[in-house]
């Protein structure tokens, strides 16, 4: 019962993080309103969150489906 909402929230969250990464890489250092350090930190944190989300999903699927 919870698989559909879980995968929907995961997909939306990962899509938003990927869009943030792409937008910040495309405009890195060109915007005077946001410093390069701020954009760099957003890119690093977004990539870290995507990697952590994938690690959590893999670990949960292994535990859920009994593949240890």
Image (cartoon, rainbow, N blue to C red):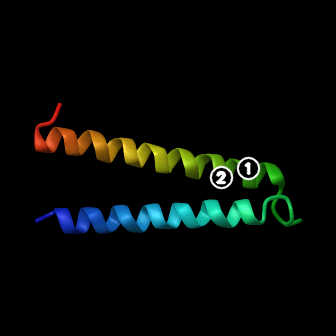
Q: Secondary structure at mark 1?
A: helix
Q: Residue at position x 78%, y 65% from top?
A: 27
Q: Which of the numbered marks, if any, corresponds to residue 43? A: 2
Residue 58 horizontal side relative to residue 42, left or right: left
In which quadrant will I find the C terminus?
top left
At 21% from the left edge and 45% from the top edge, which residue is drawn? 61
| Residue 19 x %, y % | 57, 67
Q: Report, in whole angstroms, how far the alpha carbon at label 1 lies from the one at label 2.
A: 5 Å
Q: Characterize the local packing of mark 1: few (<14), some (14-19) or many (20 or more) Cα atoms within 10 angstroms.
A: some
Contact between marks 1 and 2 (CB within 8 A): the answer is yes
Q: In the rendering, at what x and y percent does residue 1 appear? A: 10, 65
Left/right placement of residue 19 relative to residue 54 reads: right
Is the residue 28 above or below the residue 54 in the image? below
Q: Which residue is mark 1?
A: 40
Residue situated in front as seen by the camera: 23 or 39: 23
Q: Position of residue 35 (x, y in %)?
A: 83, 56
Residue beneath the point at 86% across and 65% down: 30
Q: Residue at x 45, y 61 (%)?
A: 14
Task: Give the farthest residue toward the top.
Answer: 68
Above or below, comparing residue 55 to residue 26 in the picture = above
Q: Residues within 10 Å of mark 2 (few under 14, many from 20)?
A: many
Left/right placement of residue 50 relative to residue 10 reads right
Left or right, residue 30 beside residue 39: right
- Residue 43 in the image: x percent, y percent? 65, 52
User: Based on the displayed image, in which of its 4 quarters is residue 59 positioned?
Assistant: top left
Q: Is residue 62 above or below residue 7?
A: above
Q: Within the image, what quadrant is residue 24 found in?
A: bottom right
């Amino acid at each position: 019962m919870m698989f559909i909402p879980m995968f929907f929230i995961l997909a939306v969250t990962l899509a938003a993080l990927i869009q943030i990464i792409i937008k910040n890489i495309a405009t890195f250092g060109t915007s005077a309103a946001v410093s390069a350090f701020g954009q760099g930190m957003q890119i690093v944190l977004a990539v870290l969150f995507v990697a952590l989300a994938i690690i959590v999903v893999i670990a949960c699927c292994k535990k859920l489906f009994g593949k240890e």
